[in-house]
Image (cartoon, grey):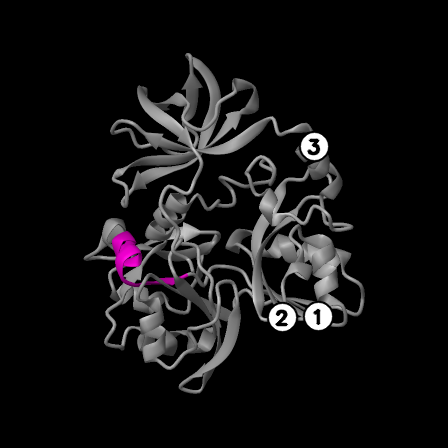
């Protein structure tokens, strides 16, 4: 399959990016002269800029657009006002499995903009189109926009130097103009740091990227490798690993993103039953007590019995230790502080069960 390219591909190549496939797109994993550790540290300590243009974009417009989306996706759009964003899930009606996790941007009652994951955009749009009344227009705008994530404690300083809005609250967005380019400045991100995501017309992405690196606030280009270590430190789930058609919101501790009292959403009946009965497995955090580095699909053991599996695992650059998210069997009776072992390539590594995040959030 031919991979799609970001409108910023040439800029990444010029910076010596190492590329990898992400959801059908060829995107930068890390850059020469830095690597994941330095890029991770830049976001935690100063400011890093990510190209996340591979993320999907879809628009629902027409009378009652917000009410329709609210009847499909799990979270309750009625909890937020226009100009705010919300983390939500698209679940399967029959199984309750997660088709995708999504950020929904509420413009008004008749206009909602969604950012799903790259690999799932077509399926999310397909399901919405199949369920939508005739008066709604649902468009897949995946390649029409670029998304640039400006993340870190100096992100406000950087955007302010460009005259962009910075004082809106977390999970809100504003439209703005940068040298004649109309863009959306969102107070969102997936790193756990104070930051912004800029939704930019694809044809203007290079100009905006260059302006972001042209201020007196020194920023580092960051690849998706660092984005993964940053989100894992926060315990943020990655669809396809920590959430999937086989891993429900109840199992993944994502019940906070479900409007349980709403009249309807896809998968409500089966998920409500699972919530009432208790899930057969639950997502926990693990912290290594030794030098072991956990990775996805490694087995978790207690008293020499397999009690779960790693879904995401990495070395934490902030804590200098191995960390993981793992689905643990409820029947094992494990909880905060429990000791387990992980089979790390044939060697037993001692780990402690904990609740994420692994570092203190700084999103606000």
Residue 158 is labelled as: none
Q: Is residue 139 above or below residue 32?
A: below
Q: Residues within 10 Å of mark 3 (few under 14, many from 20)?
A: few
SS for tag 2? loop
Q: Measured from the top left, where is residue 84 in percent x and y?
A: 57, 66
Q: Does 329 appear in magenta?
A: no
Q: Nearer the viewer, residue 63 or 34?
A: 63
Mark 2, residues whose alpha carbon is within 10 Å: few (<14), some, or many (≥20)?
A: some
Comparing 273 with 40, the one in front is: 273
Residue highlighted by disc 2: 82
Place of residue 202 in the rendered image (x, y in percent of width and height, measured from the top left): 47, 73
Can residue 144 be seen in the rendering of this structure?
A: no
Which residue is the extreme one toward the top? 304
Say which residue label 3 marks: 276
Q: Whole-Å distance between the Cαs marked 3 and 2?
A: 33 Å
N-term mark: 3 or 1: 1
In 3D space, how far apart are the residues under numbered discs 3 and 1 (Cα atoms)? 32 Å
- Residue placed most toward the observer, 62 or 32: 62
Q: Residue at x 73, y 72 (%)?
A: 62
**Can residue 259 be seen at all in this image of the molecule?**
yes
- Considering only order in the chain, which callout, 2 or 1, is on the residue closer to the N terminus? 2
Q: Nearer the viewer, mark 3 or mark 1?
A: 3
The number of discs equals 3
In this view, 204 is above or below 325: below
Q: Are marks 1 and 2 in contact (CB under 8 Å)?
A: yes
Q: CA distance from mark 1 to mark 2?
A: 8 Å
Q: Say which residue label 1 marks.
A: 109
**Residue at x 34%, y 67% (from the top left corner):** 155
Q: Is residue 41 magenta?
A: yes
The stretch of residues the image draws in magenta is: 39-51
């Amino acid at each position: 399959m031919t991979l799609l390219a970001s409108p910023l591909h040439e800029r990444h190549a010029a910076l010596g990016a190492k590329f990898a496939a992400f959801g059908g797109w060829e995107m930068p994993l890390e850059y020469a002269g830095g690597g994941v550790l330095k890029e991770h540290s830049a976001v935690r300590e100063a400011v890093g800029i990510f190209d996340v243009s591979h993320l999907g974009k879809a628009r629902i417009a027409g009378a009652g657009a917000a009410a329709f989306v609210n009847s499909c996706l799990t979270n309750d759009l009625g909890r937020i006002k226009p100009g705010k964003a919300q983390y939500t899930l698209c679940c399967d009606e029959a199984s309750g499995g997660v088709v995708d996790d999504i950020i929904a941007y509420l413009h008004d009652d008749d206009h909602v903009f969604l950012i799903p994951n790259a690999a799932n955009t077509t399926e999310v749009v397909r399901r919405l189109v199949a369920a939508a009344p005739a008066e709604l227009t649902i468009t897949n705008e995946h390649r029409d926009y670029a998304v640039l994530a400006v993340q870190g404690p100096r992100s406000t300083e950087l955007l302010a130097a460009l005259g962009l809005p910075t004082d809106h609250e977390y999970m809100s967005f504003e439209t703005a103009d940068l040298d004649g380019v109309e863009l959306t400045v969102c107070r969102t991100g997936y790193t756990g740091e104070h930051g912004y995501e800029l939704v930019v017309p694809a044809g203007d992405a290079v100009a905006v990227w260059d302006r972001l690196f042209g201020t007196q606030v020194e920023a580092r280009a960051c690849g998706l490798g660092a984005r993964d270590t940053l989100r894992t430190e926060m315990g943020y789930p990655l669809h396809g690993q920590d959430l999937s058609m086989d891993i429900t919101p109840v199992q993944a501790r994502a019940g906070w993103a479900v409007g349980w009292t709403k009249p309807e959403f896809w998968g409500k009946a089966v998920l409500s039953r699972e919530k009432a009965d208790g899930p057969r497995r639950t997502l926990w955090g693990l912290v290594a007590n030794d030098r072991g580095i956990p990775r996805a699909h490694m087995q978790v053991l207690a008293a020499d019995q397999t009690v779960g599996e790693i879904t995401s695992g990495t070395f934490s650059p902030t804590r200098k230790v191995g960390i993981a998210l793992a689905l643990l069997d409820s029947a094992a009776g494990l909880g905060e502080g429990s000791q387990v072992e992980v089979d790390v390539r044939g060697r037993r590594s001692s780990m402690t069960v904990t609740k994420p995040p692994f570092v203190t959030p700084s999103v606000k």
